[in-house]
Image (tube, rainbow, N blue to C red):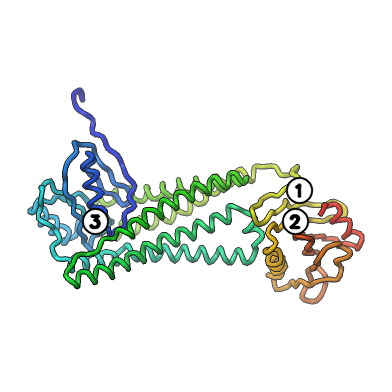
Amino acid sequence: MNEGKERVRYKRQLINFLLFDYEGVEAHLEKMAAKGWILDTVGQNVWKYRKEEPAKLKYAVTYAPDASMFAPEPSGNQQTLADFCAQAGWIKVGDWSQAQIFVSDRENPVPIETDEEIRLDVIRESMHKSWIPANVVLILLMVFNTWRSINNFERDPVANLSSYWMLMTQVFVFIAVVLVSSNLVGYIIWMKKSRRQVAEGGRCCSPGIVRQLNKWSLIGAGAYFVLFILSTISEGESFAAKYMITYMIGFFGLVAILNITREALKKRGVSREANIAVFVIVDIVLAFAMVGIVTAFAMSDIFSTDHSNDDPYVPEVQSTFVAAYTEGQLPAPEVYYEISEIKMEGLLQFCFEKTVADYEKFDFWVVKEEDDEKAWGVDKSYREYTVDGDPGSSWILLRDNYIIEIYAPDGLTAGDKAAVLSKLGI
């Protein structure tokens, strides 16, 4: 039935252009058309091209501030704009948020935008409609995560410094903050420069530097992601690589499902308000489900591993800064212990003080330095006490570059103390 009929070829492309970079979008689409790839469908994150004969097409990007990706029908302004452009030989390809993309096969079509001041005002209004609020919210969320990471580091630097997983995750969040912030700052600088040039009778300035910064920042983030995966695997934290890979797959899957849901509701004529409500509900439900499923899947190898025969003196996790040894138990006297080796001398006192402070996070415990260093054979010895002055069952010891945490529910004699560290080989 389809004999003799050539099958149409398509390809999809992940888009990383900034919304206000109309020049970059136009140049990119014209270059793609010259290679025979004609823009077919405009998605929020992915654009689809169809393969045809190479063509010399002209593309134009203009803006409609009242456009909504949730509305089932174009707004009155969008429709008026499309009709006006059609009379001038411009055919609408699709909407990209507030950006409207048009194409013309005429060699010198009538420009859609003729007043640079109006163009700049419309771009500014469009950016304030969705792009700026979304980026500000994203930055605030990332700053919150960074603040939480700093708090966690201050509370327990040993756990944070001993794990490449935790260290590199914090760096990854910082990179994301810098990337999104630089785009926002780049837009502000571009807008100010364009205002100045337009006021002097010129055109909007080219966001070339901002475009390149965005491009190389994304490449850098991708390279860091690969480094993250390889580093965590090489350092024995394969669960971290597994978690990150499955999380990214889940994230992009979530975005795809949300986009498909939104477009399906638009085609069914669902109102903008109802579409937004469904979008938010689906987003929240799927986000919680994704995090739970991905976490369970990625961490399953940790909980299924039998550590009963592990050598207690082999670090469970370690980095350039800290090696945290496996927790263990001695039978007689009954002692539970945890050992951390601080590899970097400059961090030793800081980590020890934070470990001591962590024992005082509950109001009913205080930690006091004791005079039994000789009994233990250590450099420093601290013990946990109740606020009433009764001695507890926990000690924090410092010997050379080791922090040793001891818990003995039945207490320890002077002889027991020396025997404990002897058995631990510290």
User: Quick check: can you spot residue 229?
Assistant: yes
Q: CA distance from mark 2 to mark 3?
A: 59 Å
Helix, strand or loop status at disc 3: helix
- Residue 293 position in % (x across, y down): 51, 47
Q: Which residue is mark 3?
A: 23
Q: Quadrant of the N terminus?
A: top left
- Residue 116 position in % (x across, y down): 17, 66
Q: Amino acid at mark 2?
A: Ile
Mark 2 or mark 1: whose residue is earlier in sequence:
1
Q: Which residue is mark 2?
A: 339
Q: Amino acid at mark 1?
A: Pro
Q: Which residue is mark 1?
A: 312
Residue drawn at the location 75% of the way across and 59% of the way down: 401
Characterize the local packing of mark 3: few (<14), some (14-19) or many (20 or more) Cα atoms within 10 angstroms: some
Characterize the local packing of mark 2: few (<14), some (14-19) or many (20 or more) Cα atoms within 10 angstroms: many
Nearest to the observer: residue 308 or residue 272: 308
Vertical comparison of 388 with 95: above or below? below
Q: Amino acid at mark 3?
A: Glu
